[in-house]
Amino acid sequence: MPYIAMARKWRPRSFSEMVGQEHIAQTLKNAIATEKVHHAFLFTGTRGVGKTTSARILASMLNCTAEGEKPCGQCESCKAIAAGSSMDVLEIDAASNNGVEDMRTILDGTQYPPMNSQHRILIIDEVHALSKQAWNSMLKTLEEPPHYLIFIFATTEVNKVLPTILSRVLRFDFKRLSPLQISKRLAYVCEQEGIKIAPEALSIISEKADGSMRDALTIFDEVFAYSGNSITAESVQNALGIPSDTLYFELVKAFEAHDAKGSFAVLEKAIAAGVEVQVFLEGLIRFLRNFLYSKIGLTAETLEISQENLDNLKKLAPTFEQGDILRIAKIITELSERCSSRHGLNPRLLAEAEFSKIAWLDRVVNIKEVLENIKNTPLKEESQKKIGSFI
Ligand SMILES: [Zn+2]
């Protein structure tokens, strides 16, 4: 059987399968249940958060011929929409059909009532890419649409959509997904597919997906091709060219020991393994965050890491206070930004310069210890009096 990309295979077919956009799903479901359906919708949000998928689900719900729960997924209309062959649902990518002629042809096709369903539905993806003339030619139909016609627009750049259009549509803002939401969905997909995956592997993929479910599944395909049916944190790191946590443990230990040379050696190892400096730094930021949270007392489950990894983090660099970790994280975050801004500076040299600074950072002094020391040190009577009023 040919391999089907996970993003395609696990594309939600109903709102109940959709992750993270419950506010939108509920509103649309209510509108359909009460038969108060607007004739034009605008779905906005970053890429891969479910805009086009929701447009198809909405189209399926509107044209589903079954009684009860819609979309049923079984009727002719539902099947045709899923296969992309419905005569009554037209899906257009505005990025490649953005001219006024294209728009006229499309609108001509909407003059006639639907063939097999209740509505004719026009889904226009990346709608901000339409030319001004194309928008204008559509405006009249948008103002006075035939009763069967429904527009669903999707865009990643709502600021480029003309105000005259915005005022005529019902707008829905799609949220970026949290790493936890992505992990949960991936875990579900793995369970259904019979694939074993470690919590840390899920965590790395969902972080890298940066809020996009589609990206998460695409990354997952890459990892699956490399690892097969058993996916560990290490296999994800190898598949994606991400450095292993072992290197970060070594690096933080070198920082703690004021060992600048040792920190360079870790960077060298990563580079020799084919890891880019920028990627190494991004991983380091994630590692430092987990390190900090382990000190605060967050659980392995919240951090989406294994208990073993959490125990190791707790034992790592005991002389570092939370303030020290925060300072290091700040330096690394700024360094990562400088490295990605491509000023032509050598990222490796920049990283080494900052690593040596970190290795020689003064530690944040533990205030409690200082106070204890002051209390226990015999002082002249006068100083005792002064300090006594503070402690
Ligand atoms: Zn149906």
Image: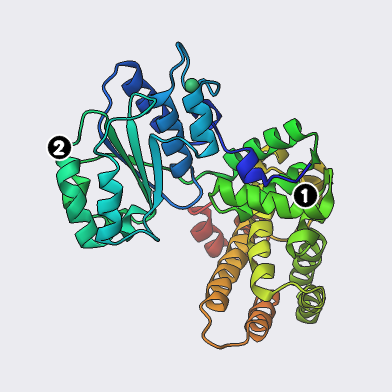
Q: Position of residue 322 (x, y in %)?
A: 63, 56
Which of 321/237 is in front? 237
Label 1 secondary element: helix
Which residue is depicted at the point 33% across and 53% down?
Answer: 127
Q: Is residue 106 visible?
A: yes
Q: Which mark is residue 144?
A: 2
Residue neighbourhood size for the residue with mark 1, other residues' Cα within 10 Å, grouped as few (<14), some (14–19), many (≥20):
some
Task: Give how far apart the Cα atoms at labels 1 and 2 are.
Answer: 50 Å
> Hey, which quadrant is residue 262 in on the image?
bottom right
User: Which amino acid does the dot numbered 2 rest on?
Assistant: Glu
Which mark's residue is nearer the viewer, 1 or 2? 2
Q: Which mark is residue 344?
A: none
User: Which amino acid does the dot numbered 1 rest on?
Assistant: Phe
Residue 386 falls left or right of residue 241: left
Compared to 208, does 29 lie above or below?
Answer: above
Residue neighbourhood size for the residue with mark 2, other residues' Cα within 10 Å, grouped as few (<14), some (14–19), many (≥20):
few
Which of 124/266 is in front? 124
Q: Are marks 1 and 2 in contact (CB under 8 Å)?
A: no
Q: Position of residue 2 (x, y in %)?
A: 76, 45
Label 2 secondary element: loop
Q: Which mark is residue 224?
A: 1
Compared to 317, does 45 lie above or below?
Answer: above
Residue 153 falls left or right of residue 197: left
Which residue is depicted at the point 77% across and 77% down?
Answer: 271
Q: Position of residue 302 (x, y in %)?
A: 65, 39
Which residue is depicted at the point 58% across and 88% down?
Answer: 345
Q: Position of residue 22 (x, y in %)?
A: 45, 30
> Hey, which quadrant is residue 377 in on the image?
bottom right
Disc on the earlier residue, 1 or 2: 2
Compared to 348, does 380 lie above or below?
Answer: above
